[in-house]
Amino acid sequence: MRLTCTVNGTTRTADDVWAGESLLYVLRERLGLPGSKNACEQGECGSCTVYLDGTAVCACLVAAGQAAGRDVRTVEGLAPEGELDPVQRAFLQTGAVQCGFCTPGLIVSVHDLLARVPHPSDPEIREALAGNLCRCTGYEKIMDAVRLAAAGGAGS
Amino acid sequence: MDFMTPPTWADALAIRAERPDAVPIAGGTDVMVELNFDRRRPGVLLDLTRIGDLTTWAMDGELLRVGAGVSYTRIIEELGDRLPGLAMAARTVGSPQIRNRGTLGGNLGSASPAGDGHPPLLASGAQVELASVRGTRLVPVAEFFTGPKRSVLAPDELIAAVWVRPADGPEQFSKIGTRNAMVIAVSSFSLALHPGRREVGTGIGSAAPTPRRATEAELFAAGQLPWDTLAALEPGVARRFGELVAAAASPIDDVRGTAAYRRHALAVLAQRTLTWAWRDLCG
Ligand SMILES: Cc1cc2nc3c(=O)[nH]c(=O)nc-3n(C[C@H](O)[C@H](O)[C@H](O)COP(=O)(O)OP(=O)(O)OC[C@H]3O[C@@H](n4cnc5c(N)ncnc54)[C@H](O)[C@@H]3O)c2cc1C
Ligand code: FES
Ligand code: FES
């Protein structure tokens, strides 16, 4: 089938989409947007987190056809080309990135958290990131990154 | 495999009747896992996310009608005051991403003995509205489940909504798992006190082939709680309630826990939730 949706503000079309494939597959394999990562394909790791009509979801659990006509925003679309979102800068400045595989999903989850709760408490941060697994950092630097971004310390 | 997106409920029911090989998909948090891992290859994916009616809730007389497509996040944010037990259970589901997408209708559709939405619906005596081109019927949640991942849902039926009376007393939900987030319950328990009617509702999760009530425990607590004096709960009453709840379960050994542990955990959950709820009532 043919799938048309808005991705990062631009209307995009993919052809020969199989009815059972995920939005994650469409983004990575058909639209050339490999920012969202594929690790578990079962909603456990959060590395594929994207916005679907403004709501943070696991792209691996959205059927491609469910995204038709909808608004998708991926980690690639958080800041204009060549620039970084404050959340991305905070991750860099605090050393919250090691292998980087979990990072795109975490960035979207943190972006979503701070849009809803500009000054989250530590328990609120942990709760918001409960669906994003990181095998490298031990999470402490990630907590630092969220606190820095929330405090506006990563620049705007 | 086809992908069909009915714009209305009537269209969805017509497709459901014509295509026995269709699998409905709402939030996709169960269905997509099965597709991604090649465990299921339906002839049609029947997408229910464009049907506006499914994602609404409203009071109808004394009852709340909650559309099958209302997500856990919305249950927490919009219905937490009217359905506190269900909202507590919703807060324990998966992660924010899963709660944003997963629905109550999908939880019922999967009919897992461990589904976290089921115990609170049992405790508050909810009914499930099932619809097909043949018509609509209401089934008490306690009669909805027939076995592990099986229910009375007929091949041509869809789940339209859940009907439930808003809480008329304290409600509690508690769940045992290996961590706070992202766990399937080892066992879970939900409790609803109805001081006006002097009744107690219960729901057991993950400790029997289906979610189920603990009827004897309900009658025992209703008879023993000091409704008139609102005196402190006697430890013996809480303990006996826990024993009766554990006795109502028929758990199995599996990777998440042994039957003996599940029974023990249930007794503890039941005692605790009764203690908390009674304290809430007495203020
Ligand atoms: C990482 C992860 C964590 C999870 N954690 C939990 C948890 O803590 N607790 C818990 O209870 N569950 C959990 N789940 C399971 C799942 O999220 C829930 O069962 C959820 O309620 C399913 O809803 P859905 O809308 O996503 O269903 P879908 O996947 O869309 O559908 C589930 C089933 O219901 C059927 N269905 C859906 N809607 C209807 C309808 N209106 N009429 C008829 N049939 C219908 C589908 O055909 C399918 O068989 C988890 C899942 C994942 C991936
Ligand atoms: S790849 Fe989607 S949650 Fe892991
Ligand atoms: S930085 Fe390696 S998984 Fe998080």
Image (tube, coloured by chain):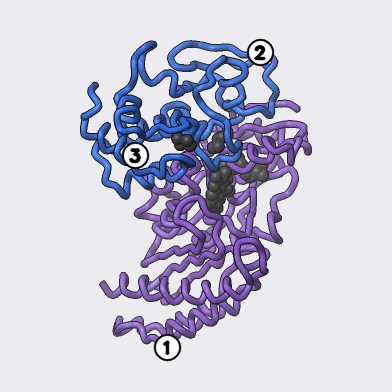
Q: Give me the disc on residue B236.
A: 1
CA gap, disc 1 and disc 3 = 49 Å
> How far is the residue under mark 3 from the one under mark 2?
41 Å
Left or right side of B40 for B122: left
Identify the residue at image location x=54%, y=21%: A34
Identify the residue position indicated by label 2 in the image.
A15
Foreground tag (1 vs 3): 3
Residue at 24% in and 21% down: A156
The numbered mark 1 sits on a residue in which chain?
A: B
What separation in Å lies between label 1 and label 2 (alpha carbons)? 67 Å
Residue A77, compared with residue B71, is above or below; it is above
| Element marked by disc 1 | helix
Amino acid at pointer 1: Gly
Give the chain letter for blue.
A
Q: In terms of secondary structure, where does tag 3 sit? A: helix
Q: Which chain is purple?
A: B
Q: Amino acid at mark 3?
A: Lys
Q: x%, y% of residue B71? A: 48, 42
